[in-house]
Amino acid sequence: MNRILFEPAEIAGDLATFGGARAEHVRTVLHGEVGQILKTGELDGAIGTGEIVEMGESIRVRVRHTDVPLPPWVDLVLAPPRPRVLKRLLPQLATLGVGRIVLVGAKKVEKDFWGATLLKEEIYRPLLVDGLMQGCVSSRVPTLETRRNFRKFVTDELDARFPTANRLVAHPYGADGGGAANGAQSGAGRLLLAIGPEGGWTDEEVALLEAHGFARHSLGPRILRTDTATVALLAQLMPRL
Amino acid sequence: MNRILFEPAEIAGDLATFGGARAEHVRTVLHGEVGQILKTGELDGAIGTGEIVEMGESIRVRVRHTDVPLPPWVDLVLAPPRPRVLKRLLPQLATLGVGRIVLVGAKKVEKDFWGATLLKEEIYRPLLVDGLMQGCVSSRVPTLETRRNFRKFVTDELDARFPTANRLVAHPYGADGGGAANGAQSGAGRLLLAIGPEGGWTDEEVALLEAHGFARHSLGPRILRTDTATVALLAQLMPRL
Protein backbone atom coordinates (compact mmCIF):
# COMPACT_ATOMS: atom_id res chain seq x y z
CA MET A 1 0.00 0.00 0.00
CA ASN A 2 2.30 2.68 -1.32
CA ARG A 3 -0.51 5.20 -1.86
CA ILE A 4 -3.83 5.40 -0.03
CA LEU A 5 -6.65 5.79 -2.53
CA PHE A 6 -10.16 6.98 -1.63
CA GLU A 7 -13.55 6.44 -3.18
CA PRO A 8 -14.97 9.81 -4.28
CA ALA A 9 -17.72 9.36 -1.67
CA GLU A 10 -15.10 9.23 1.08
CA ILE A 11 -13.94 12.76 0.27
CA ALA A 12 -15.94 15.80 1.42
CA GLY A 13 -14.41 19.13 0.52
CA ASP A 14 -10.70 18.60 1.18
CA LEU A 15 -11.24 16.04 3.95
CA ALA A 16 -11.07 12.28 3.39
CA THR A 17 -12.30 9.91 6.11
CA PHE A 18 -11.53 6.20 6.02
CA GLY A 19 -11.33 3.03 8.11
CA GLY A 20 -10.70 -0.65 7.47
CA ALA A 21 -7.54 -2.10 5.97
CA ARG A 22 -6.19 1.26 4.84
CA ALA A 23 -6.54 2.75 8.32
CA GLU A 24 -4.92 -0.36 9.78
CA HIS A 25 -2.01 0.09 7.37
CA VAL A 26 -1.59 3.77 8.33
CA ARG A 27 -1.63 2.82 12.01
CA THR A 28 0.60 -0.25 12.08
CA VAL A 29 2.93 0.07 9.09
CA LEU A 30 3.24 3.83 8.64
CA HIS A 31 2.88 4.59 12.38
CA GLY A 32 0.61 7.47 11.41
CA GLU A 33 0.20 10.48 13.69
CA VAL A 34 -1.48 13.85 13.35
CA GLY A 35 0.53 16.12 11.05
CA GLN A 36 2.09 13.27 9.08
CA ILE A 37 1.94 13.52 5.28
CA LEU A 38 0.78 10.50 3.28
CA LYS A 39 0.71 9.75 -0.43
CA THR A 40 -2.98 9.75 -1.31
CA GLY A 41 -5.34 10.00 -4.26
CA GLU A 42 -8.91 9.73 -5.44
CA LEU A 43 -9.97 6.62 -7.37
CA ASP A 44 -10.39 7.57 -11.03
CA GLY A 45 -9.24 11.07 -10.10
CA ALA A 46 -6.17 13.11 -9.22
CA ILE A 47 -3.41 12.04 -6.81
CA GLY A 48 -1.26 13.94 -4.36
CA THR A 49 -0.79 14.07 -0.61
CA GLY A 50 -2.90 14.00 2.51
CA GLU A 51 -2.03 15.39 5.95
CA ILE A 52 -3.40 13.41 8.88
CA VAL A 53 -5.69 15.66 10.91
CA GLU A 54 -7.39 13.05 13.10
CA MET A 55 -6.41 9.57 14.30
CA GLY A 56 -9.48 7.96 15.80
CA GLU A 57 -11.57 4.88 15.03
CA SER A 58 -11.50 6.33 11.54
CA ILE A 59 -8.64 8.39 10.18
CA ARG A 60 -9.15 11.81 8.64
CA VAL A 61 -6.71 13.49 6.27
CA ARG A 62 -6.70 16.89 4.54
CA VAL A 63 -5.97 16.07 0.91
CA ARG A 64 -4.26 18.06 -1.77
CA HIS A 65 -4.83 16.15 -4.99
CA THR A 66 -3.27 18.15 -7.80
CA ASP A 67 -1.11 15.59 -9.60
CA VAL A 68 -2.07 13.75 -12.75
CA PRO A 69 -1.85 9.95 -12.34
CA LEU A 70 -0.13 7.78 -14.95
CA PRO A 71 -2.74 6.61 -17.45
CA PRO A 72 -3.07 2.92 -18.40
CA TRP A 73 -0.93 1.91 -21.37
CA VAL A 74 -2.43 -1.48 -22.28
CA ASP A 75 -5.74 -3.34 -22.48
CA LEU A 76 -6.19 -7.11 -22.23
CA VAL A 77 -8.30 -9.64 -24.04
CA LEU A 78 -7.77 -12.46 -21.58
CA ALA A 79 -8.95 -16.06 -21.71
CA PRO A 80 -9.27 -16.46 -17.97
CA PRO A 81 -7.32 -19.01 -15.93
CA ARG A 82 -8.98 -20.68 -12.94
CA PRO A 83 -10.58 -18.20 -10.51
CA ARG A 84 -7.92 -18.90 -7.87
CA VAL A 85 -5.20 -17.89 -10.31
CA LEU A 86 -7.12 -14.92 -11.70
CA LYS A 87 -7.68 -13.68 -8.16
CA ARG A 88 -3.92 -13.47 -7.65
CA LEU A 89 -3.45 -11.94 -11.08
CA LEU A 90 -5.99 -9.09 -10.89
CA PRO A 91 -4.10 -6.86 -8.43
CA GLN A 92 -0.94 -7.34 -10.45
CA LEU A 93 -2.73 -6.23 -13.63
CA ALA A 94 -3.81 -3.03 -11.89
CA THR A 95 -0.29 -2.44 -10.58
CA LEU A 96 1.22 -2.97 -14.03
CA GLY A 97 -0.98 -0.36 -15.73
CA VAL A 98 -3.76 -2.32 -17.45
CA GLY A 99 -6.77 -0.18 -18.36
CA ARG A 100 -9.50 -2.53 -19.57
CA ILE A 101 -9.81 -6.27 -19.14
CA VAL A 102 -12.16 -8.31 -21.31
CA LEU A 103 -12.46 -11.94 -20.19
CA VAL A 104 -13.33 -14.04 -23.22
CA GLY A 105 -14.65 -17.57 -23.62
CA ALA A 106 -11.89 -19.22 -25.62
CA LYS A 107 -12.39 -22.92 -26.31
CA LYS A 108 -10.08 -24.14 -23.56
CA VAL A 109 -11.51 -21.93 -20.81
CA GLU A 110 -13.20 -24.15 -18.24
CA LYS A 111 -16.97 -23.81 -18.52
CA ASP A 112 -17.61 -23.43 -14.81
CA PHE A 113 -15.36 -20.36 -14.72
CA TRP A 114 -18.27 -18.12 -15.64
CA GLY A 115 -20.11 -18.83 -12.41
CA ALA A 116 -17.18 -17.73 -10.23
CA THR A 117 -18.04 -15.29 -7.45
CA LEU A 118 -14.83 -13.49 -8.38
CA LEU A 119 -16.75 -12.00 -11.31
CA LYS A 120 -18.93 -9.93 -8.99
CA GLU A 121 -17.79 -6.33 -8.88
CA GLU A 122 -17.88 -6.19 -5.07
CA ILE A 123 -15.38 -9.07 -5.05
CA TYR A 124 -12.95 -8.10 -7.82
CA ARG A 125 -12.94 -4.32 -7.42
CA PRO A 126 -11.13 -4.31 -4.04
CA LEU A 127 -8.44 -6.53 -5.59
CA LEU A 128 -7.90 -4.04 -8.39
CA VAL A 129 -7.82 -1.12 -5.95
CA ASP A 130 -5.21 -2.99 -3.87
CA GLY A 131 -3.09 -3.29 -7.00
CA LEU A 132 -3.38 0.44 -7.71
CA MET A 133 -2.38 1.31 -4.13
CA GLN A 134 0.67 -0.97 -4.54
CA GLY A 135 1.70 0.61 -7.85
CA CYS A 136 1.54 4.14 -6.38
CA VAL A 137 1.37 6.09 -9.65
CA SER A 138 -2.14 5.49 -10.96
CA SER A 139 -5.70 5.92 -9.67
CA ARG A 140 -7.68 4.54 -12.61
CA VAL A 141 -9.51 1.36 -11.64
CA PRO A 142 -9.29 -1.15 -14.50
CA THR A 143 -12.65 -2.12 -15.95
CA LEU A 144 -13.55 -5.79 -16.19
CA GLU A 145 -16.07 -7.26 -18.61
CA THR A 146 -16.94 -10.77 -19.75
CA ARG A 147 -17.68 -11.97 -23.29
CA ARG A 148 -18.35 -15.68 -23.39
CA ASN A 149 -18.73 -15.75 -27.18
CA PHE A 150 -15.15 -15.16 -28.29
CA ARG A 151 -15.80 -15.18 -32.04
CA LYS A 152 -18.71 -12.78 -31.78
CA PHE A 153 -16.72 -10.42 -29.59
CA VAL A 154 -13.73 -10.33 -31.94
CA THR A 155 -15.83 -10.12 -35.10
CA ASP A 156 -18.53 -7.67 -34.06
CA GLU A 157 -17.20 -5.62 -31.20
CA LEU A 158 -13.43 -5.52 -30.89
CA ASP A 159 -12.58 -2.99 -33.61
CA ALA A 160 -15.11 -0.46 -32.39
CA ARG A 161 -14.18 -0.88 -28.74
CA PHE A 162 -10.41 -0.90 -29.23
CA PRO A 163 -9.50 1.35 -32.14
CA THR A 164 -5.74 0.82 -31.71
CA ALA A 165 -3.72 -0.87 -34.47
CA ASN A 166 -1.13 -1.87 -31.91
CA ARG A 167 -2.21 -5.46 -31.24
CA LEU A 168 -0.33 -8.55 -30.09
CA VAL A 169 -1.43 -12.09 -29.44
CA ALA A 170 0.56 -14.36 -27.16
CA HIS A 171 0.22 -18.02 -26.36
CA PRO A 172 2.45 -20.62 -24.72
CA TYR A 173 3.33 -22.39 -27.94
CA GLY A 174 4.67 -19.18 -29.36
CA ALA A 175 5.65 -18.03 -32.76
CA ASP A 176 7.57 -15.07 -34.04
CA GLY A 177 9.81 -13.98 -31.18
CA GLY A 178 10.53 -10.50 -29.97
CA GLY A 179 10.30 -8.58 -33.23
CA ALA A 180 6.66 -7.61 -32.94
CA ALA A 181 7.14 -6.53 -29.35
CA ASN A 182 9.81 -4.05 -30.24
CA GLY A 183 7.52 -2.58 -32.85
CA ALA A 184 4.74 -2.42 -30.31
CA GLN A 185 6.75 -0.31 -27.91
CA SER A 186 7.75 2.38 -30.31
CA GLY A 187 5.01 4.91 -29.91
CA ALA A 188 2.31 3.09 -31.86
CA GLY A 189 -0.23 4.02 -29.19
CA ARG A 190 -2.01 2.09 -26.50
CA LEU A 191 -1.43 -1.64 -26.77
CA LEU A 192 -4.10 -4.34 -27.00
CA LEU A 193 -2.79 -7.70 -25.83
CA ALA A 194 -4.58 -11.04 -26.26
CA ILE A 195 -3.55 -13.80 -23.84
CA GLY A 196 -4.79 -17.36 -24.18
CA PRO A 197 -5.97 -19.94 -21.67
CA GLU A 198 -3.77 -22.43 -19.81
CA GLY A 199 -4.09 -24.94 -22.67
CA GLY A 200 -3.38 -22.29 -25.33
CA TRP A 201 -5.49 -20.72 -28.07
CA THR A 202 -6.84 -23.07 -30.72
CA ASP A 203 -5.49 -22.60 -34.25
CA GLU A 204 -8.84 -21.10 -35.26
CA GLU A 205 -8.72 -18.59 -32.44
CA VAL A 206 -5.22 -17.45 -33.34
CA ALA A 207 -6.23 -17.21 -37.00
CA LEU A 208 -9.22 -15.06 -36.08
CA LEU A 209 -7.05 -12.72 -34.02
CA GLU A 210 -4.45 -12.51 -36.77
CA ALA A 211 -7.22 -11.64 -39.23
CA HIS A 212 -8.03 -8.76 -36.91
CA GLY A 213 -4.53 -7.35 -36.93
CA PHE A 214 -2.94 -9.11 -33.95
CA ALA A 215 0.76 -9.88 -34.48
CA ARG A 216 2.16 -12.94 -32.75
CA HIS A 217 4.44 -12.54 -29.78
CA SER A 218 6.39 -15.39 -28.25
CA LEU A 219 7.91 -15.48 -24.80
CA GLY A 220 10.62 -17.88 -25.87
CA PRO A 221 11.04 -21.63 -25.55
CA ARG A 222 9.89 -21.99 -21.95
CA ILE A 223 6.20 -22.72 -21.41
CA LEU A 224 4.89 -20.39 -18.73
CA ARG A 225 1.80 -20.72 -16.57
CA THR A 226 -0.90 -18.24 -17.62
CA ASP A 227 -0.32 -15.92 -14.68
CA THR A 228 3.46 -15.99 -15.09
CA ALA A 229 3.06 -15.42 -18.83
CA THR A 230 0.75 -12.46 -18.32
CA VAL A 231 3.11 -10.67 -15.94
CA ALA A 232 6.07 -11.57 -18.17
CA LEU A 233 4.41 -10.15 -21.28
CA LEU A 234 3.38 -6.93 -19.58
CA ALA A 235 6.91 -6.55 -18.18
CA GLN A 236 8.47 -7.03 -21.60
CA LEU A 237 6.16 -4.59 -23.32
CA MET A 238 5.64 -1.85 -20.74
CA PRO A 239 7.07 1.60 -21.32
CA ARG A 240 9.96 2.21 -18.90
CA LEU A 241 9.67 6.05 -19.06
CA MET B 1 3.15 -30.51 -16.41
CA ASN B 2 4.40 -30.20 -19.97
CA ARG B 3 7.22 -32.70 -19.45
CA ILE B 4 7.35 -35.57 -16.95
CA LEU B 5 10.70 -35.53 -15.15
CA PHE B 6 12.09 -38.48 -13.19
CA GLU B 7 14.52 -38.75 -10.32
CA PRO B 8 17.57 -40.79 -11.44
CA ALA B 9 16.56 -43.47 -8.94
CA GLU B 10 13.23 -43.92 -10.73
CA ILE B 11 15.00 -45.00 -13.93
CA ALA B 12 16.41 -48.51 -14.29
CA GLY B 13 18.01 -49.23 -17.65
CA ASP B 14 15.62 -47.59 -20.10
CA LEU B 15 12.53 -48.06 -17.93
CA ALA B 16 11.12 -45.36 -15.67
CA THR B 17 8.46 -46.20 -13.08
CA PHE B 18 6.46 -43.54 -11.28
CA GLY B 19 3.29 -42.86 -9.31
CA GLY B 20 1.78 -39.91 -7.46
CA ALA B 21 0.87 -36.58 -9.03
CA ARG B 22 2.72 -37.28 -12.27
CA ALA B 23 0.90 -40.58 -12.80
CA GLU B 24 -2.39 -38.85 -11.97
CA HIS B 25 -1.60 -36.21 -14.60
CA VAL B 26 -0.80 -38.84 -17.23
CA ARG B 27 -4.06 -40.64 -16.43
CA THR B 28 -6.52 -37.78 -16.17
CA VAL B 29 -5.09 -34.95 -18.28
CA LEU B 30 -3.13 -36.81 -20.96
CA HIS B 31 -5.48 -39.83 -21.01
CA GLY B 32 -2.41 -42.04 -21.16
CA GLU B 33 -2.56 -45.52 -22.67
CA VAL B 34 0.02 -48.14 -23.58
CA GLY B 35 1.96 -47.11 -26.67
CA GLN B 36 1.45 -43.37 -26.11
CA ILE B 37 4.55 -41.17 -26.34
CA LEU B 38 5.17 -38.59 -23.60
CA LYS B 39 7.71 -35.80 -23.24
CA THR B 40 9.99 -36.97 -20.45
CA GLY B 41 13.41 -36.35 -18.94
CA GLU B 42 15.75 -37.12 -16.08
CA LEU B 43 16.26 -34.50 -13.38
CA ASP B 44 19.69 -32.93 -13.82
CA GLY B 45 20.12 -35.11 -16.91
CA ALA B 46 19.04 -35.45 -20.52
CA ILE B 47 15.49 -35.06 -21.84
CA GLY B 48 13.56 -36.76 -24.62
CA THR B 49 10.54 -39.02 -24.88
CA GLY B 50 9.01 -41.96 -23.07
CA GLU B 51 6.65 -44.59 -24.46
CA ILE B 52 4.07 -45.90 -22.02
CA VAL B 53 4.57 -49.68 -21.63
CA GLU B 54 2.41 -50.27 -18.56
CA MET B 55 -0.56 -48.45 -17.00
CA GLY B 56 -1.14 -49.88 -13.55
CA GLU B 57 -1.08 -48.51 -10.02
CA SER B 58 2.26 -47.13 -11.15
CA ILE B 59 3.02 -46.17 -14.72
CA ARG B 60 6.04 -47.50 -16.60
CA VAL B 61 7.57 -45.84 -19.66
CA ARG B 62 10.48 -46.80 -21.91
CA VAL B 63 12.56 -43.65 -22.11
CA ARG B 64 14.82 -42.35 -24.84
CA HIS B 65 16.62 -39.39 -23.33
CA THR B 66 19.04 -38.07 -25.92
CA ASP B 67 18.28 -34.34 -26.02
CA VAL B 68 20.25 -31.66 -24.24
CA PRO B 69 18.06 -29.51 -21.95
CA LEU B 70 18.29 -25.71 -21.99
CA PRO B 71 20.80 -24.63 -19.35
CA PRO B 72 19.94 -21.94 -16.77
CA TRP B 73 20.80 -18.40 -17.89
CA VAL B 74 20.57 -16.47 -14.62
CA ASP B 75 21.31 -16.78 -10.90
CA LEU B 76 19.54 -14.86 -8.12
CA VAL B 77 20.67 -13.16 -4.96
CA LEU B 78 17.24 -12.78 -3.45
CA ALA B 79 16.16 -11.06 -0.25
CA PRO B 80 13.24 -13.38 0.42
CA PRO B 81 9.63 -12.21 0.66
CA ARG B 82 7.27 -13.90 3.14
CA PRO B 83 7.29 -17.71 2.86
CA ARG B 84 3.77 -17.73 1.42
CA VAL B 85 4.92 -15.49 -1.42
CA LEU B 86 8.22 -17.31 -1.93
CA LYS B 87 6.35 -20.59 -2.14
CA ARG B 88 4.40 -19.26 -5.12
CA LEU B 89 7.54 -17.80 -6.63
CA LEU B 90 9.84 -20.84 -6.50
CA PRO B 91 8.16 -22.88 -9.26
CA GLN B 92 8.11 -19.79 -11.47
CA LEU B 93 11.85 -19.28 -10.95
CA ALA B 94 12.50 -22.85 -12.10
CA THR B 95 10.23 -22.38 -15.11
CA LEU B 96 11.95 -19.14 -16.08
CA GLY B 97 15.46 -20.68 -16.14
CA VAL B 98 17.06 -19.68 -12.84
CA GLY B 99 20.09 -21.82 -11.94
CA ARG B 100 21.12 -20.90 -8.41
CA ILE B 101 19.16 -19.06 -5.75
CA VAL B 102 20.89 -17.53 -2.74
CA LEU B 103 18.46 -16.19 -0.13
CA VAL B 104 20.18 -13.38 1.75
CA GLY B 105 19.42 -11.61 5.01
CA ALA B 106 18.95 -8.04 3.86
CA LYS B 107 17.96 -5.59 6.60
CA LYS B 108 14.26 -5.51 5.72
CA VAL B 109 13.83 -9.29 5.53
CA GLU B 110 11.55 -10.39 8.36
CA LYS B 111 13.58 -12.18 11.00
CA ASP B 112 11.20 -15.10 11.43
CA PHE B 113 11.59 -15.95 7.75
CA TRP B 114 14.64 -18.10 8.49
CA GLY B 115 12.62 -20.59 10.50
CA ALA B 116 10.19 -21.29 7.66
CA THR B 117 9.58 -24.95 6.88
CA LEU B 118 9.73 -23.93 3.22
CA LEU B 119 13.52 -23.86 3.60
CA LYS B 120 13.66 -27.64 4.04
CA GLU B 121 14.76 -29.35 0.86
CA GLU B 122 11.95 -31.92 1.00
CA ILE B 123 9.49 -29.01 0.93
CA TYR B 124 11.01 -26.68 -1.67
CA ARG B 125 12.47 -29.21 -4.08
CA PRO B 126 9.09 -30.54 -5.31
CA LEU B 127 8.06 -26.93 -6.03
CA LEU B 128 11.15 -26.39 -8.16
CA VAL B 129 10.61 -29.70 -9.98
CA ASP B 130 6.99 -28.66 -10.69
CA GLY B 131 8.32 -25.48 -12.26
CA LEU B 132 10.73 -27.42 -14.46
CA MET B 133 7.96 -29.76 -15.62
CA GLN B 134 5.87 -26.69 -16.52
CA GLY B 135 8.70 -25.05 -18.46
CA CYS B 136 9.28 -28.21 -20.53
CA VAL B 137 12.79 -27.40 -21.81
CA SER B 138 15.06 -27.83 -18.79
CA SER B 139 15.83 -30.59 -16.30
CA ARG B 140 18.30 -28.81 -14.03
CA VAL B 141 16.87 -28.35 -10.53
CA PRO B 142 17.78 -24.90 -9.23
CA THR B 143 19.91 -24.96 -6.09
CA LEU B 144 18.76 -23.00 -3.06
CA GLU B 145 21.05 -21.73 -0.29
CA THR B 146 20.64 -19.29 2.57
CA ARG B 147 23.10 -16.64 3.74
CA ARG B 148 21.75 -14.62 6.64
CA ASN B 149 24.78 -12.34 6.80
CA PHE B 150 24.33 -10.30 3.63
CA ARG B 151 27.50 -8.19 3.97
CA LYS B 152 29.71 -11.19 4.68
CA PHE B 153 28.25 -13.09 1.73
CA VAL B 154 28.79 -10.23 -0.72
CA THR B 155 32.22 -9.32 0.61
CA ASP B 156 33.75 -12.75 1.15
CA GLU B 157 31.95 -15.19 -1.06
CA LEU B 158 30.11 -13.69 -4.00
CA ASP B 159 33.00 -13.07 -6.39
CA ALA B 160 34.37 -16.58 -6.03
CA ARG B 161 30.97 -18.24 -6.31
CA PHE B 162 29.68 -16.12 -9.20
CA PRO B 163 32.56 -15.19 -11.47
CA THR B 164 30.34 -13.38 -13.99
CA ALA B 165 30.79 -9.65 -14.58
CA ASN B 166 27.20 -9.45 -15.80
CA ARG B 167 25.47 -8.21 -12.64
CA LEU B 168 22.33 -6.20 -12.04
CA VAL B 169 20.64 -4.99 -8.89
CA ALA B 170 16.95 -4.14 -8.86
CA HIS B 171 14.76 -2.60 -6.22
CA PRO B 172 11.29 -1.04 -6.20
CA TYR B 173 12.51 2.53 -5.87
CA GLY B 174 14.51 2.17 -9.04
CA ALA B 175 17.26 4.08 -10.64
CA ASP B 176 18.84 4.01 -14.04
CA GLY B 177 16.19 2.59 -16.35
CA GLY B 178 16.52 0.02 -19.05
CA GLY B 179 20.01 0.82 -20.32
CA ALA B 180 21.84 -1.66 -18.15
CA ALA B 181 19.37 -4.37 -19.05
CA ASN B 182 20.07 -4.08 -22.73
CA GLY B 183 23.77 -4.36 -22.03
CA ALA B 184 23.12 -7.38 -19.88
CA GLN B 185 21.42 -9.27 -22.66
CA SER B 186 24.12 -8.88 -25.26
CA GLY B 187 26.20 -11.98 -24.76
CA ALA B 188 28.01 -10.89 -21.61
CA GLY B 189 27.51 -14.36 -20.13
CA ARG B 190 25.30 -15.74 -17.43
CA LEU B 191 23.50 -13.03 -15.48
CA LEU B 192 23.58 -12.49 -11.72
CA LEU B 193 20.54 -10.59 -10.51
CA ALA B 194 20.08 -9.14 -7.01
CA ILE B 195 16.48 -8.54 -5.93
CA GLY B 196 15.61 -6.74 -2.70
CA PRO B 197 12.99 -7.35 -0.03
CA GLU B 198 9.43 -5.99 -0.03
CA GLY B 199 10.59 -2.79 1.69
CA GLY B 200 13.54 -2.36 -0.67
CA TRP B 201 17.31 -2.52 -0.19
CA THR B 202 18.83 -0.03 2.24
CA ASP B 203 21.16 2.57 0.76
CA GLU B 204 24.12 0.73 2.32
CA GLU B 205 23.07 -2.55 0.74
CA VAL B 206 22.77 -1.01 -2.72
CA ALA B 207 26.13 0.72 -2.28
CA LEU B 208 27.75 -2.59 -1.32
CA LEU B 209 26.32 -4.30 -4.39
CA GLU B 210 27.39 -1.45 -6.64
CA ALA B 211 30.89 -1.69 -5.19
CA HIS B 212 30.82 -5.32 -6.32
CA GLY B 213 29.96 -4.50 -9.90
CA PHE B 214 26.15 -4.60 -9.86
CA ALA B 215 24.58 -2.06 -12.22
CA ARG B 216 21.20 -0.65 -11.25
CA HIS B 217 18.11 -1.73 -13.13
CA SER B 218 14.74 -0.07 -12.72
CA LEU B 219 11.39 -1.51 -13.67
CA GLY B 220 9.90 1.92 -14.26
CA PRO B 221 7.71 4.19 -12.16
CA ARG B 222 5.28 1.54 -10.87
CA ILE B 223 6.14 -0.09 -7.56
CA LEU B 224 5.76 -3.84 -7.93
CA ARG B 225 5.31 -6.48 -5.25
CA THR B 226 8.45 -8.59 -4.81
CA ASP B 227 7.04 -11.59 -6.61
CA THR B 228 5.68 -9.52 -9.49
CA ALA B 229 8.98 -7.65 -9.71
CA THR B 230 11.00 -10.85 -9.83
CA VAL B 231 8.98 -12.36 -12.67
CA ALA B 232 8.98 -8.99 -14.46
CA LEU B 233 12.74 -8.64 -14.23
CA LEU B 234 13.41 -12.17 -15.44
CA ALA B 235 10.97 -11.63 -18.31
CA GLN B 236 12.68 -8.42 -19.36
CA LEU B 237 16.16 -9.88 -19.23
CA MET B 238 15.69 -13.44 -20.49
CA PRO B 239 17.13 -14.47 -23.82
CA ARG B 240 14.33 -15.04 -26.32
CA LEU B 241 16.45 -17.37 -28.56
Image: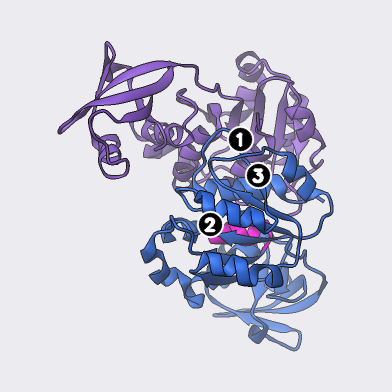
Chain colours: A blue, B purple
A3 relative position to B142: left or right: right
> Tag on residue B5?
none
Q: Magenta part mainly helix, strand or loop?
A: helix
Counting residues from the start of the chain, the first of labels 1 and 2 encountered is 2
Q: Which residue is mark 2?
A: A89
* Chain letter of the residue beneath label 2 in the structure image: A
For residue A60, what is the image quadrant? Answer: bottom right
Q: Nearer the viewer, mark 1 or mark 2?
A: 1
Residue neighbourhood size for the residue with mark 1, other residues' Cα within 10 Å, grouped as few (<14), some (14–19), many (≥20): many
Question: For the residue carrying disc 2, how many other residues have a C-alpha within 10 Å: few (<14), some (14-19), or many (20+)?
Answer: many
SS label for mark 3 = strand
Q: Are marks 1 and 2 on the same chain?
A: yes
Residue B41 in sight: no
N-terminal-most mark, 3 or 2: 2
Quarter assignment of residue B71: top right
Q: Which mark is residue A220?
A: 1
The magenta-colored residue range is: A90-98
Q: Which mark is residue A217?
A: 3
Which three-letter amino acid code belongs to the residue tagged 2? Leu
Asked whether the beta carbons under mark 3 and mark 2 sit within 8 Å of each other, the answer is no
- Indicate the quadrant containing the N terminus of chain B: top left, top right, bottom left or bottom right: top left
Q: Position of residue B7 (x, y in %)?
A: 33, 22
Report the chain holding disc 3.
A
* In this view, the mark in front (3 or 2): 3
Say whether residue B56 is magenta: no
Kind of residue indicated by mark 1: Gly
